[in-house]
Amino acid sequence: MNKVNDVVAIQFVKGRNEKDLPEIRLFRNQDRKRGQAIYKFSKPTTITLQNLQSIEKMYLLDEEGELSTRRIDLSITYNNIIEVKSEYNWNSEKEFERYMRFAERYANSYTNH
């Protein structure tokens, strides 16, 4: 597969890497094929009150390309802090393996700094 980019990143706004490190929880169904990764961002840096309505996807970018999800829950707390919860789902072992390659690259991109 061709190398798409040199960046491993999460984006909500195309072209702007999210700097807030999310809490990530993985779940797999008993069949071990299907599952989900739940992302929680406490203080996202690329989402503002001004662009809140235009956020449509969470993009997971790495050298293999792009994974994305429309499952995003944006909320504003009492003091206007925006929190984001997003869910990335997979439906096969192959999709899970692809997601895990992204997850490993994403984790390594922060441990290598």
Image (cartoon, rainbow, N blue to C red):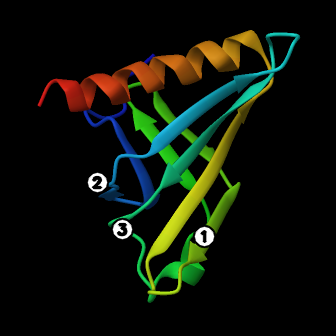
Q: CA distance from mark 2 to mark 1?
A: 17 Å
**Label 3 environment density (alpha carbons within 10 Å; few <14, some 14–19, many ≥20):** some
Q: Position of residue 58 (x, y in %)?
A: 55, 53
Tell me the kind of residue under disc 1.
Answer: Leu
Q: Camera-side residue: 1 or 48? A: 48
Circle 1 residue: 74
Which residue shows up at 28% across the image and 54% down it? 19
Q: Earlier in the sequence, mark 2 or mark 1?
A: 2
Residue 70 sits in which quadrant?
bottom right
Which residue shows up at 39% across the image and 64% down it? 44
Circle 3 residue: 46
Q: Is residue 29 left or right of residue 14?
A: right
Q: Position of residue 69 (x, y in %)?
A: 65, 48
Circle 2 residue: 19
Q: Earlier in the sequence, mark 3 or mark 1?
A: 3
Tell me the kind of residue under disc 2.
Answer: Lys
SS for callout 1: strand
Residue 3 seen: no
Q: Camera-side residue: 86 or 83? A: 83
Residue 74 sits in which quadrant?
bottom right
Q: Position of residue 73 (x, y in %)?
A: 66, 64
Q: CA distance from mark 2 to mark 3?
A: 8 Å
Q: Quadrant of the C terminus?
A: top left
Q: Earlier in the sequence, mark 2 or mark 3?
A: 2
Tag 2 near tag 3, CB within 8 Å: yes
